[in-house]
Image (cartoon, coloured by chain):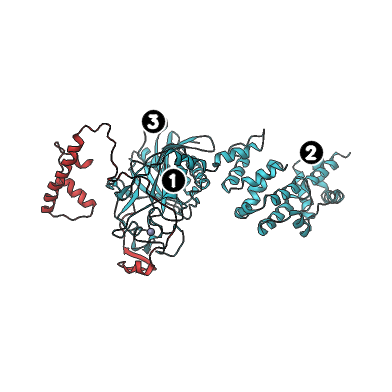
Amino acid sequence: MSATEGTPAGRLTRQEVAHVAMLARLHLDDEELDRFTGQLAVILDHAADVAALDLDGVPPTSHALSLANVLRADEPRPGLDRDEVLAGAPDVEDHRFRVPRILGEAP
Amino acid sequence: MSGVPGHDGWELVVGLEVHCELKTATKLFCGCPNSFGDEPNTNVCPVCLGLPGSLPVLNQRAVELAMAIGTALHCDIRPSTFHRKNYFYPDMPKDYQISQYDEPINADGWLELPDGARVGIVRAHLEEDTGKTTHAGASGRIHGADYSLVDYNRSGVPLVEIVSAPDLRSPAQARSYAAELRAILVATGASDGKMEEGSMRVDANVSVRRAGSSELGTRCEIKNLNSLRSLAHAVEHEAQRQVEVLESGGVVRQETRHWDEDRGATVTLRSKEEAEDYRYFLEPDLVPVVPDDGWRSAVAEALPPMPAARRRKLGALFGDEPVEPGGARSDQVATVVDLGLDELVEAAVAEGVPAALALARTANEAATDADAARRLPLVSYVALLRMEATGELTATQVKTVLADLLRDGGGDPAELARERGFEALSSEAVAAMVADAIAAHPDEWGRYRSGEDKLTGFFTGAVMKASRGQADGKAVAAELARRRAEP
Ligand SMILES: [Zn+2]
């Protein structure tokens, strides 16, 4: 993971936390950046402890539950009433959600 | 065929990413109807609106259609997981798209083009579609829009994204790949293949390199390719643009470009320099999909014959005469397979209709209303083509009766021909009309007699006109030949 690269000791940097916060559209002030950098570093240290174990032959876990193939039949059922749905929208035009102008294209 | 048109010494490298909407009854993770063209925001629920507390449940049919696509593309069908791809854009109300990331359901396959070339398939994975945004304001485009309107009916519709290897080497080959893939997707029953309605969407990764080089050049991704024609045009124009940049000492920047159909050019959409960081992580609300051998073979056994096999089968009707790739007959075979009219041709040939005639009537006339043609009782169709094969009806008459059959959804072609007043002209009547035509055009007749064979068409046309299409072209040609042979 890129979050543990970049410093000799592999410690999380303040800049990396700022970058991740930007990606998540979180506005953190200086004090928060310091606090979260420390907290996140502890979590990553714990992951590093696990990574340091000899895990050859242990398959990666993709889910906390040991379940697979939880599926639903392809049968339609009615959704929500449109007026009810649009009542929760900040703004509506032509039965569509009206949102501010978007800068840039969808990824 | 390969290379950059108009620029010797350069090689074109193209890979395609195709998004295919699956023809399920419901969305990928909720029971909302998967239906195109409904009133906006009528097929929505807490799951596909991303409301707090809602949980996704995977659609079994979508998984099976994805497996069918993987099987048809000779992929390994593997245990797979779902990830969240995080980004902020109003077409995705959860602020993430659920997609498959490092463990796709299908990987490492191939597709064979009609010319025999094999194109690698890197992966074909499941993901959900986004809502549909409409940009309001002066231009209708994003830039300059005042605001956007969002309809979430499409949000959560199941997609399979099929990523090819960069194995395509010309605009024509890129087009051929997309056409073949579309035919396969339609044949599996996974998709209706309608590019114009957006149920199949194609993005092209294009780069160029000096001929003989094995390194890949910097690539650009082209979006907004709404037809096979625009795909071929866009790839050609983009390749030429890149060659011109490089030949003038410039550098191709890795970026996403938009194909502008009206201007016939690609324009920059966004630069990839701001490295994409979607913070993918495992979707905690979904468990892995692990198909066992039994499930895999059930999907494989249910798979109908694929277009390549069906084309071979039709080609085999011609026996020793090969169907040349790229020729008129091969186009007719492709049309028949595309439209699912194979059975009409096969049934007619089985009843003694010459293969060329059966193929031509099916690809040219029956194809004009393929939906009706697929429903036509085979016995009616075969009886009609037999009437042409035996000379009972002329080609023109057969086309008219076929239009009646398609309109009525079947019927007795002999009866319809009688109603139309179509009766084969007697040989005396044909001889008389040929004699009239000769008398009316003595100069042409002299030239025809002295060996100008191309005038056969002139005289045949004159007789056809006089008989209002009721004369049999073969009978006319035979009478002309008989008259010429007279001393
Ligand atoms: Zn829904």
Q: Amino acid at mark 2?
A: Gly
Residue under circle 1?
Answer: B66
Point out the frontmost of discs 3 and 2. Answer: 3
Query: Badge 3: how crowded within 10 Å, few (<14), some, or many (20+)?
Result: few
Query: Badge 1: how crowded within 10 Å, few (<14), some, or many (20+)?
Result: many
Residue under circle 2?
Answer: B451
Which mark sits nearer the N-terminus, 1 or 2? 1
In the rendered image, residue B203, in percent from the top left (x then y), is placed at 41, 47
Residue under circle 3?
Answer: B214
Q: Is residue B476 positioned above or below B143 on the image?
A: above
Element type at marker 2?
loop
**Residue at (32% x, 63% y) in the render:** A99
How far is disc 3 from disc 2 in space, using C-alphas? 58 Å
- Indicate the chain on which mark 1 is placed: B
Element type at marker 3?
loop
Q: Which chain is cyan?
A: B
Which mark sits nearer the N-terminus, 3 or 2? 3
